């Protein structure tokens, strides 16, 4: 049985705690500041999240003082964590082909009209994402707003 | 020659498990990220009833609890077992607070019927949903009259069309079923419920034909036909709009006899594009996270159960439970910005 000799490293847990609180407050501040370019908010807030995660992992979970075995566990997992969303991006997130789901087609138009009519609905800001899906030309269905029969 | 890595089997086991847990949450969080980017028009926090305040508070609660856990482990290493018990108790209390806040948030979602599969995504779906919910209210009200020993003798309320004429006959002074005393109050109540049925039927027929409630007042086939005959070629009767239905429902909610039942049974119609996708992902992520919080609480409870018997042998248990708890905190550190801020 091997014993860990990390008790020699004295970590000031209280200091780490205050740093974590500070980061949490910072991410709320970034949210309240409300940058016009939403991507700025996303990048800043996720950077804060990564910083907090590092604080917890290195100090609370003591990884700073552990050996190289930590990379054997963390590296494959990190590769998967980044690789999986990346692999799914082209099909679901960016959709390099024309999506034909109801949400993109008829429903999307209907809901755009509904939103315009109900524009007083508070903090909508009509999130226009980077990829513009609003004028997707889709061949199929007629757009005639005919009577809906179940 | 020193073999193997310099940590205990238990600790290595916990780290390997945490590695699999990272993969587990990667699946859900990755799915959320990918769907969120690919869905232009994702619901706003106003639609989803997500408030940054509660999320931030929960984040703070978990950070404090992580601090408490690390102090518990430090106390165990220093052989201060009763101090460790105190820190574990504080961790447990904070975990309960976290679940309480989560429960409060979930209650808010349920009261707005924000559940996967329950959310209408277009105005027409919202109208259809309101119509279905109103029908359920009508059936419940009428079922009271036809239950065993009820006012009229119809075995089931399968077809409202057979129930209502009998109820009308009763209301206008007809005989009740055997053994029922037909009082004036009962007849008045029947009158109110018949009216509710007729108001629902009106809405239902307007919805099926998609005709505005204002243009054709009555739900009779005859009046549609007349109204259509009066149209010029190419003209259509104005369509049913969500605002009309909302006004109609508000009117029904104001009624003294059946208003409360309508308020309780019918949610305000509110379409949310991608609402069901949001609800599925939200409940998956936060639900599994909450289950992990529960498991962490069980781990701590087993150490706390030792009471004054807690000794050095439990140091590894407390340390590894702490590692698990820090992981739970890590997941929330990512969930908070993704669900509450980036939304």
Image (cartoon, coloured by chain):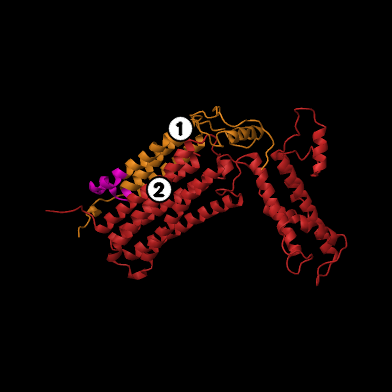
Chain colours: A orange, B red
| The C terminus of chain A: image quadrant | top right
Q: Which mark is residue A94?
A: 1
Instruction: Return the residue nearer the eye: A72 or B120.
Output: B120
Asked whether A60 falls inside the magenta stretch, the response is yes
Residue at image position (43%, 52%) is B62
Horizontal side, residue B130 vs residue B96: left or right: right
Q: Residues within 10 Å of mark 1 (few under 14, many from 20)?
A: some
Instruction: Return the residue nearer the eye: B28 or B59.
Output: B28
Span of residues in magenta:
A59-76
| The N terminus of chain A: image quadrant | bottom left
For the residue labelled by badge 1, is the local secondary structure a helix, a strand or a loop?
helix
For the residue labelled by badge 2, is the local secondary structure a helix, a strand or a loop?
helix
Residue B297 in view (yes/no): yes
Horizontal side, residue B147 vs residue B300: left or right: right
Q: Position of residue A114 (x, y in %)?
A: 64, 35
Extreme residue in the left direction: B1
Asked whether B322 falls inside the magenta stretch, the response is no
Label 1 lies in what chain? A
Label 2 lies in what chain? B
Q: Position of residue A136 (x, y in %)?
A: 54, 28
Q: Which residue is mark 2?
A: B25
Q: Position of residue B277 (x, y in %)?
A: 52, 43
Horizontal side, residue A76 vs residue B189: left or right: left
> Rounded to the nearest whole Å, what is the CA distance between mark 2 and mark 1?
22 Å
Q: Please identify the dominant SS of the magenta region.
A: helix
Residue at image position (38%, 37%) is A87
């Amino acid at each position: 049985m091997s014993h860990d000799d990390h008790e020699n490293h004295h970590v000031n847990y209280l200091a780490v705690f205050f740093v974590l609180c500070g980061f949490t407050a910072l991410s709320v501040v970034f949210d309240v500041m409300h940058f016009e370019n939403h991507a700025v908010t996303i990048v800043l807030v996720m950077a804060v999240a990564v910083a907090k995660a590092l604080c917890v992992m290195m100090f609370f979970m003591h990884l700073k003082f552990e050996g190289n075995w930590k990379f054997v566990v963390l590296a494959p997992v990190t590769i998967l964590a980044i690789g999986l969303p990346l692999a799914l991006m082209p099909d679901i997130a960016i959709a390099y082909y024309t999506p034909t789901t109801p949400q993109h087609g008829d429903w999307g138009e209907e809901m755009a009209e509904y939103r315009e009519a109900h524009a007083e609905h508070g903090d909508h800001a009509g999130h226009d994402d980077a990829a513009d899906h609003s004028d997707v030309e889709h061949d199929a269905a007629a757009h005639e707003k005919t009577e809906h029969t179940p | 020659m020193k073999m193997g890595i310099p940590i205990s089997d238990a600790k290595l086991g916990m780290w390997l498990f945490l590695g699999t847990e990272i993969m587990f949450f990667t699946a859900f969080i990755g799915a959320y990220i990918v769907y969120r980017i690919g869905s232009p028009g994702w619901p706003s926090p106003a639609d989803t009833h997500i408030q940054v305040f509660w999320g931030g508070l929960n984040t703070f609660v978990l950070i404090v609890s992580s601090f408490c856990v690390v102090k518990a482990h430090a106390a165990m290493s220093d052989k201060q077992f009763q101090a460790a018990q105190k820190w574990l108790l504080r961790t447990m209390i904070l975990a309960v607070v976290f679940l309480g806040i989560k429960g409060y948030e979930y209650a808010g979602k349920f009261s707005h019927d924000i559940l996967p599969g329950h959310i209408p995504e277009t105005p027409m779906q919202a109208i259809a949903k309101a119509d279905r919910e109103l029908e359920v209210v009508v059936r419940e009200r009428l079922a009271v009259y036809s239950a065993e020993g009820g006012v009229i003798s119809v075995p089931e309320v399968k077809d409202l069309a057979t129930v209502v004429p009998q109820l009308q006959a009763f209301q206008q002074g007809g005989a009740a079923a055997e053994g029922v005393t037909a009082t004036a109050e009962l007849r008045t109540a029947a009158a109110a419920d018949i009216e509710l049925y007729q108001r629902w039927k009106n809405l239902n027929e307007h919805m099926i034909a998609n005709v505005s409630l204002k243009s054709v007042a009555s739900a009779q086939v005859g009046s549609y036909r007349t109204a259509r005959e009066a149209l010029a070629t190419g003209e259509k009767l104005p369509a049913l709009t969500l605002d009309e239905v909302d006004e109609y429902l508000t009117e029904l909610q104001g009624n003294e006899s059946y208003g409360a039942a309508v308020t309780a049974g019918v949610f305000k119609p509110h379409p949310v594009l991608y609402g069901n996708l949001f609800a599925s992902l939200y409940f998956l992520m936060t639900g599994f996270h909450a289950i992990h919080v529960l498991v962490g609480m069980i781990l701590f409870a087993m150490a706390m159960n030792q009471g004054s018997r807690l000794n050095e042998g439990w140091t590894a248990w407390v340390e590894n439970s702490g590692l698990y708890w820090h992981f739970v905190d890590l997941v929330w550190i990512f969930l908070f910005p993704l669900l509450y801020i980036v939304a």
